[in-house]
Image (cartoon, helix red, strand yellow):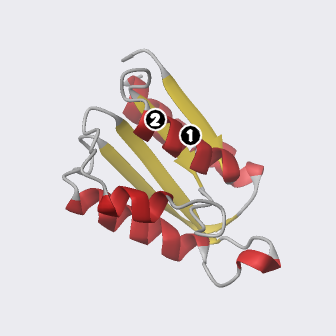
Amino acid sequence: RVDHIIAGSSMGGLMSFQMAYENPNVFGGAICMSSAFHRKLSNILDKVKDSEHVPLNVKFYIDTGEFEVVEEEYKDENIVTLYKEMLEILKQKGYREDVNLKSYFHKGAKHHEIYWAERLNIPLKFLLKK
C-alpha cells in the first residue's frame, strides 16, 4: 500500500482521488492535478463532506492553475473554486498540510500538460520523499 500511488490530471485527477479515497488499503497516496471535481461529473465533494469514512492514512496532493478553463458545460463550477472547496473539506475532516495533504496553486498556469509537467516534482517529492 505505501508503495502504491495513483496519479492523474483533470478527469484523471478526479479518478485518482476517488480511487485512493475509496481504496486506502491499496493506495498510499494520490496525485490530483487540476482535478475535475465538478458535481456534474461526480458527487465526490459532497461524498467526502458527508462521509464518516476518512482515510487519513492516504496522502493527497491536490493542485490547480490560476487560469484553469474547461469545457463550456462546466463553467458554472470553476476548477479553482472546486480546488479550494475540496481543500477546505479535507482540512475539516482532519487532513493536515504537509502531513497527509499537499496543495499547490500555480500562478499563471492554465489547464494544460505543459503546466502539469512544470510542477510534477512537487507531488513526487511529497509522496515519494525523493
| Image location (x, y in percent) of residue 125 | 43, 31
| Image location (x, y in percent) of residue 77 | 60, 79
- CA neighbours of label 2 inside 10 A, class few (<14), some (14 to 19), many (20+): many
Q: Residue at the spot x=75%, y=70% of the render?
A: 70
- Quarter of the picture containing the C terminus is top left
Give the residue at mark 2: 20
Q: Quadrant of residue 78?
A: bottom right
* Residue 109, placed above or below residue 77: above
- CA neighbours of label 1 inside 10 A, class few (<14), some (14 to 19), many (20+): many
Asked if the residue at tag 2 contacts the one at tag 1, i.e. Cβ–Cβ closer than 8 Å, the answer is yes
The kind of secondary structure element at disc 1 is: helix
- Estimate the spatial distance between the alpha carbons at disc 1 and disc 2, rounded to whole Å: 6 Å
Foreground of the two, 106 or 90: 90
Q: Quadrant of residue 27?
A: top left
| Image location (x, y in percent) of residue 63 | 51, 56
Seen from this angle, which residue lies furthest right?
A: 72
Looking at the rendered structure, the kind of residue marked 2 is: Ala
The kind of secondary structure element at disc 2 is: helix
Seen from this angle, which residue lies furthest left?
A: 94
Looking at the rendered structure, the kind of residue marked 1 is: Ser
Q: Residue at the spot x=42%, y=70% of the render?
A: 84
Foreground of the two, 83 or 45: 45
Give the residue at mark 1: 16
